[in-house]
Amino acid sequence: SEITEKSHHVHNTQNQNRHHRKVLTKLTNHYPNSTFTMGSSQSSVSAMPPKGERVLIIGGGPSGLVALKELREKGFDATVLEKAAGVGGAFRVAYDHMFLTISTKLMGYSDFAWAGRPRYAPRAEYVEYLERYVSFFQLEDGLSFNTDVTGAVLKGNGKWEVEAEKDGKKMVMTADRLIICTGSNHNPKYAPVPGFTGETMHSSDWRSNKQVAGKRVMIIGNGESSADIAADSAEIAESVVLWARRPIPMGPRFLNQKSGDELSSMEAMQHKGSRTEMWEMLETSTTSPVSQLQSPKAYSNIRSDWVEGTLKQANHDTAHLNAVMFKNAMSSVEDGFKRSDQIFAVPKSLRMLTATSQGKMDLVIAKKAKYEGKKVTFSEYSQKNFEWPVEASRVETYDVDVVIMCTGFKNDFAWLKGVNIDWNCRNWFKNCIPPGYEDKLAFLGWTRPHQGGIPACSEMLSRYLGQIWSGEKSLPSNWKEQAQVDKKVAESWYKEAADYHTVMDYPSFMESMAKLVGCEIRRPSIFNLKRFVQYYTFP
């Protein structure tokens, strides 16, 4: 009921406030040069006196907010310019039933932990978390909403001249440094559908399955958005087929039976009294110190043993279909069974596999699709649903009213004028600092962990930028060479994600950033057994 929902909301808010008050004592020790005050319901930290250097931060998503907080704490006059009416970035405008693919433990900031047990939060709750972060650290006066940046140029005097429009009025600002936190996904990429006469749309236009009620739907792509859109469409559309040219392994959010129906499991986690353990989360097996002790071969053997055991059971459920997809993907690439899913950019959602296993939609992996009016014919099959391998001569035709393209995005920095930047971010130091602009420009949100969360990466990078730009630290003397070494390692490792230059290894990245920032973790004593076990087994 409405009363129950309001009561639960108030109860949850009170818990969050109590949790944040407990953090206050830790913050006092962590920020000895800062002054803390208590508000009516939240604590906050005020910035140190500004040094006069102005930093403009483009984008008010998770990366932009943490950059604002960290730069202010180093004394910079920092301001976020955000096009939307509030914080959150892509999470603010995302579709219904979008849940985090990373648990709240790794999507939160280190000094503003989520209260309660770890879970996969819905996107609206994540936006609320970011809003609380802004309030807690009193960042409101550093946020300029409804501000669309239309141009930026680095002038001869070493300052940025930034043009923007706010509430219909043009404005010009100057800054000593610029941090771009708009990510790398800007303009939708569309797949060619020559001869198709039905409706087409991009995943960026998707809000809910009401858009396809009663229609015959085809989804192009096999990423996280396609998994959600296909599964949601299957509940209300006349028919759904998801098509991809090649198989890729899919990562489960949970390590147990909860991944059999991820949506139901994630929705249940939001209710009071629901209990989820950290060991149930995927990142426990991919980012914990003990998991890093495994060799790639040992990890691959464990995965292969699970796959073979699941295939033998042949339960025709989500896990079974996931095993079929995994074995198909590993069989289709070089070194697949030696290095397993570690060479792919793995989507972390099984929702479309659940819908397929329940007979609500079809999953087609085939090299070719031919469009004629509202008919689509697939050929050169690799897999259909649980069937693999499939005869290459197989041909099937589907009636389709609407094609939804989950085909990604391309970046657009036409507004950033007069710069000479290689847009392969692996040529930048830590996917953040482009050569030639190390004292003037940085990018956040270009570190997409193979496992782990972008916000944590952006937090570490923001701290480091504050340190080097304030003169507290310097870039390594060989930082350009280090960037090239990191690039070669990433390219040789993520061979089947060659176009995803943002993909990187989370544990090694965070360890390297901890050394640069000066906040390396100390291993607990074995005599403190609980902390010792947590250190090695938790993400």
Image (cartoon, helix red, strand yellow):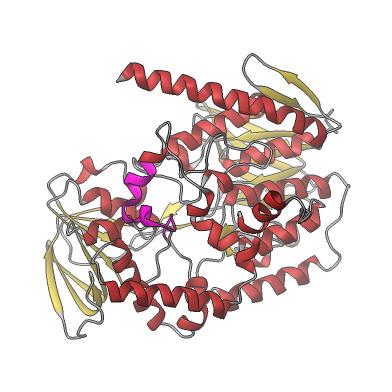
Q: Verify whether residue 158 appears in magenta.
A: no
Residue 96 drawn at (x, y percent): 34, 40
Residue pictured at 20% horizontal, 52% vertical? 234
> Residue at the location (43% across, 33% down)?
273
Q: How many marks?
A: 0
Q: Is residue 163 above or below residue 38?
A: below
Give the magenta-colored segment's residue range.
252-267
The image shows residue 80 at horizontal and vertical percentages of 63, 35
Majority secondary structure in the magenta region: helix
The quadrant of the rendering that contains the N terminus is top left
Residue closer to the observer: 329 or 528? 528
Q: Quadrant of the C terminus?
A: bottom right
Instruction: Decide whether residue 256 is among the magenta residues.
Output: yes
Residue at left offset 29%, top offset 66%: 192
Is residue 313 or residue 331 the one in the foreground?
Answer: 313
Relative vertical location of residue 252 with respect to residue 483 in this rendering, above or below: above
| In the image: residue 190, left or right of residue 209 | right
